[in-house]
Each structure stands twice: as structure tokens, then as C-alpha cells.
Amino acid sequence: MSRQNSNAFRVMVRMQVEQGLEKDFERAWQEVGDSVARNPKNLGQWLSRSLTEEGIYYLISDWVDEPSFREFEKSDAHRVHREQLNPYRSGKSMVPMQVVAQRAGNTEGANHG
């Protein structure tokens, strides 16, 4: 997480992206992600692509607490973000969760040469 918060509220979205639109989706997510990152209650975001399922992406977003996320979820800004990503997806599911513990990993090897 960008800021340490072992009690963060985390949202994981599993998204099926239309075949052939993956790179366009990744670019669109970058734009959306930049906007979300400006929200002071957002702790960080990650976009991951499945290595075992074609066209499957996982969007993970951490928030200071659930009420902050729910407020954002109902905002006009979030509606615009969904509209930006909708053309690329054919399905999605969302799993809300509470982070209960966190351990920092070894960051020395993070920059591979």
C-alpha cells in the first residue's frame, strides 16, 4: 500500500476484458487510476492481468475505511470512471474486504537491474 494502514478497506474487482482491447483497457485504467489517486482517502491501486485466464484483470484499490470508499462509489467521478472502462469489459465482479494484517516485503530486489 502506498501509505501504511493495516486496517484499510480493500476492493478487488475481477474484470473480463473483450479480446483485442486489452492494451486500450490498460491505457484507460491508467487515466482512471490517476484520477482516483488524487482522492485523499485512496491509499493505493493496482492493476494485474491474469497469467492463467485470457482477458482477466484484477483491479485492487485500498481506502482508509469503508465509508470513504462507499462515498466515492456513489460519486459523479466514479460514474465517469465506470463509463470510461465499460466499453472494454464483458463482465465483472467485486469483492470488498478488510485488511487485517500486513507485512512489508523485501524491497531491495524490487528493481531488477
Image (spheres, helix red, strand yellow):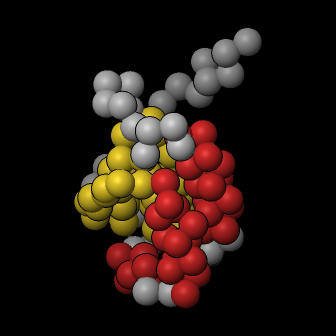
> Relative to 103, is 41 above or below?
below
Q: Position of residue 64 (x, y in %)?
A: 46, 71
Tell me: residue 7, above or below residue 73: above
Q: Quadrant of residue 44?
A: bottom right
Where is residue 69, by image quadrant?
A: bottom left
Q: Is residue 59 above or below residue 11?
A: above
Instruction: Please give left or right for residue 5 compared with residue 31 in the image.
Output: left
Residue 103 x %, y %: 40, 39
Which residue does the image show at 29% across and 61% down from the upper left? 94
Q: In this orientation, does residue 26 appear?
A: no
Residue 11 appears anywhere in the view: yes
The front one of 82 and 35 is: 82
Q: x, y (%) of residue 72?
A: 48, 81
Asked if residue 4 lies left or right of residue 13, the reply is: right
Q: Residue at x 51, y 48 (%)?
A: 46
Question: How far from the left and from the top, in percent, is residue 88?
Answer: 49, 54
Residue, far front? 20
Which residue lies at the image location 37% right of the left edge and 40% below the top edge? 56
Q: Residue at x 52, y 77 (%)?
A: 78
User: In this view of the protein, which residue sits in the foreground, 28 or 36?
Assistant: 28
Q: Residue furthest right?
A: 113
Number of disc labels: 0
Q: For the view shown, which residue lies furthest in the top direction?
A: 113
Q: Which of the image's four quarters has the C terminus? A: top right
